[in-house]
Amino acid sequence: EIVLTQSPGTLSLSPGERATLSCRASQSVSSSYLAWYQQKPGQAPRLLIYGASSRATGIPDRFSGSGSGTDFTLTISRLEPEDFAVYYCQQYGISPRTFGQGTKVET
Amino acid sequence: QVQLQESGPGLVKPSETLSLTCTVSGASISRYYWSWIRQSAGKGLEWIGRMYTSGSTDYNPSLKSRVTVSVDTSKNQFSLKLSSVTAADTAVYYCAKEGAGDPVNRVFDFWGQGTRVTVSS
């Protein structure tokens, strides 16, 4: 299975700052089948990005995804108060689908 | 709007079978892939398996020997059975819908709120 390693584990930033989250795969993710999710306490994950760089419906353009192969990045251009949460990457190119361990963005 | 709701016992005894149901509204269960995902403190988010109403299933090899996912199209529901549970199966269990069409869309676009299941005697 593909192991996804996210870094850093925790990112301490302030509102208005830029957040850069990394996701590295143990092998190439085919056709950039890489997604990003946001999870807040007590809630289910919410889809942000799919296909490595396409925003899901209703997701603000301050969220952007990039990368290919084994290295992927989620960037939040200017943090809003509601963006402080845990972010997960997930690959869906090969079964089993796997998730990273998460990056917590905290203030 | 698509909505998913998990239901089932919150407490299961060791060695017994965990059974959960996901009720879907706002989408026909016959048109998409449907998955079960769990989240525990120890293992994070773990995909359990998925199914399509054609009968096609795909399970995580780590759980395959204990997992069955099935569908009831008349009720627009799908279900999870996980046998021989241990404390390691204690987690929040989510049901989720996959996007349709091009494989690049096959992400988990709608999730249930999750249901906590504890395995304990």
Image (cartoon, coloured by chain):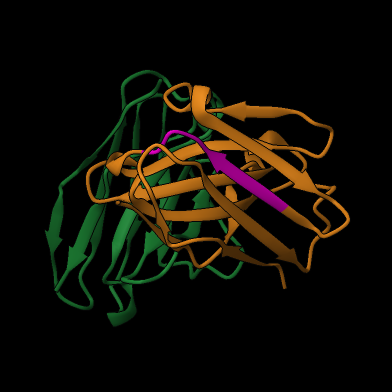
Whole-percent x, y for residue B104 in the image? 63, 38
Q: Position of residue B30 (x, y in %)?
A: 85, 48
Taking depth in this image into account, of A75 and B49 the one nearest to the observer is B49
Q: In which quadrant will I find the N terminus of chain B?
A: bottom right
Segment tinted magenta in the rendering: B78-85
Above or below, A21 relative to B64: below
Residue drawn at x 35%, y 71% is A42
- Is residue B84 part of the magenta span, yes or no? yes
Say whether residue B39 is left or right of residue A51: left
Judge whether residue A49 is colored magenta.
no
Say which residue appears at 26% left-offset and 50% top-offset.
Answer: A21
Look at the picture and state if A94 lies above or below B109.
Answer: above
> Is A48 on the left or on the right of B81, as rendered?
left
Q: Which chain is orange?
A: B
**Residue B54 percent coordinates (x, y):** 84, 33
Asked if one can make out residue B32 in the rendered structure from this viewpoint, the answer is no
* Left/right of residue A101 with respect to residue B85 in the rendered view: left
Q: Can you name the residue that lies furthest to the front here?
A: B121
Asked whether residue A91 is in view, the answer is yes
Which picture quadrant has residue A105? bottom left
Front residue of A4 and B4: B4
Q: Residue at x 70, y 50 (%)?
A: B78
Q: Which chain is green?
A: A
- Numbered circles on residues, count: 0
Relative placement, left or right, of A9 versus B39 is: left
Q: Residue furthest right?
A: B74
Q: Residue furthest bottom?
A: A81
Q: Quadrant of residue A86?
A: bottom left
- x and y percent of residue B73 in the render? 85, 51
**Mainly helix, strand or loop, the magenta region?**
strand
